[in-house]
Amino acid sequence: MSLRQVLHFITNHPLNRHHKLRGLLRFAVWQVRSRLHPGPIVYEWLDGVRFHVQRHEYALTGNIYTGLYEFHEMAFLLHVLRPEDLYIDVGANVGSYILLACGVAGARGVAFEPIPATFKRMLANIRLNELEERVDCHNLGVGREEGILLFTSDQNTTNHALAEGETSEAAAEVRVVALDSMIELKAPFLLKIDVEGFETPVLEGAMKMFANPSLKAVIMELNGTGARYGFDEDAILKTMLALGFQTYSYDPFSRRLLPLEGKNADAGNTLFIREKELIAERLRTAPAVSVQGRQL
């Protein structure tokens, strides 16, 4: 992101919209602090949860500036999960969502992150919060079937499996598995898929999991990057509809689910939900969470 894009994101974020100067102050403080202390810094986030963060680590610095980087989806996760639930994160990056799910909401978690260096940073965040007994971490990619794929490893939050004909000087060879082949995995209550366009193979390798009625909600990034592999997001939407899911966005302030026609055009992530009334009741009755001084 350019500086202009970052500042626009900060001042227009829902938690900063009426407190723009506070958001900009957090940005300025981080810029000074990160330059005076090169290397990872421990940041106190939500409800006692902390993370290691360093400059240009966009998945985490966004949380510093705003409280919840991906506000609607992160708040949905915090409101919908309960301690008895299982949450699976495919493309966990350095662990923002898994920390919220297991460190704040208290659920059990399974995290998949293919890039070795990113996986090590995620593990450090899990250990920092003493969540080793609650989270199973796998340095694996996820796809249609078991195999080996090359991934970029120098693109921060947008690392991805190389498409046919694509090259990268920093390519990492990664083992890939299908979710349905992980026999020890039970169907989660909530599943997140953030794989930079590789959603179609992930879905195809997890049809048993998706058919399991225990899975009630999916957070899936659908931002058009599947085109690099020749995948059609409309086909994903049709498959999810056939499995009984409907698409929604979420308003954390009113705790309302907002029905969509197709994917969420206003954000990278789309919520897929079945048994809406059950989900709506959970959202309504969830305890409040304090984020940047706001009660959600």
Image (cartoon, helix red, strand yellow):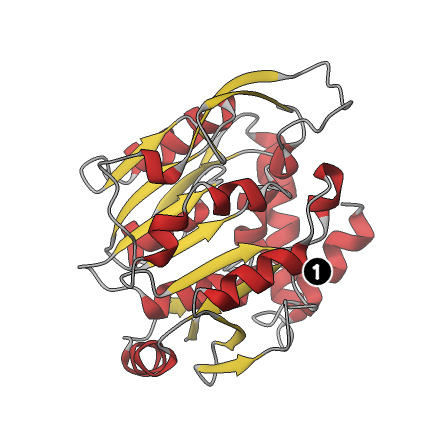
On the rendered structure, is 144 left or right of 215? right
Q: Is residue 118 left or right of residue 171?
A: left
Position in image of residue 279 (x %, y %): 34, 76
Query: Which quadrant of the rendered structure holds the C terminus?
Result: bottom left
Viewed as shown, does residue 56 lie left or right of 44? right
* Residue 42 in the image, given as x and y percentages of width and height: 42, 37
x and y percent of residue 19 in the render? 62, 73
Mark 1 secondary-structure assignment: helix
Q: Identify the residue at image location x=74%, y=57%.
A: 7
Going by the numbered disc 1, the residue's amino acid type is Phe
Quarter of the image where the N terminus is located = top right
| Image x and y of residue 84, in percent | 17, 59
Camera sees residue 48: no
Q: Quadrant of residue 179?
A: top left
Residue 271 visible in the shown view: yes
Which quadrant holds residue 82? bottom left
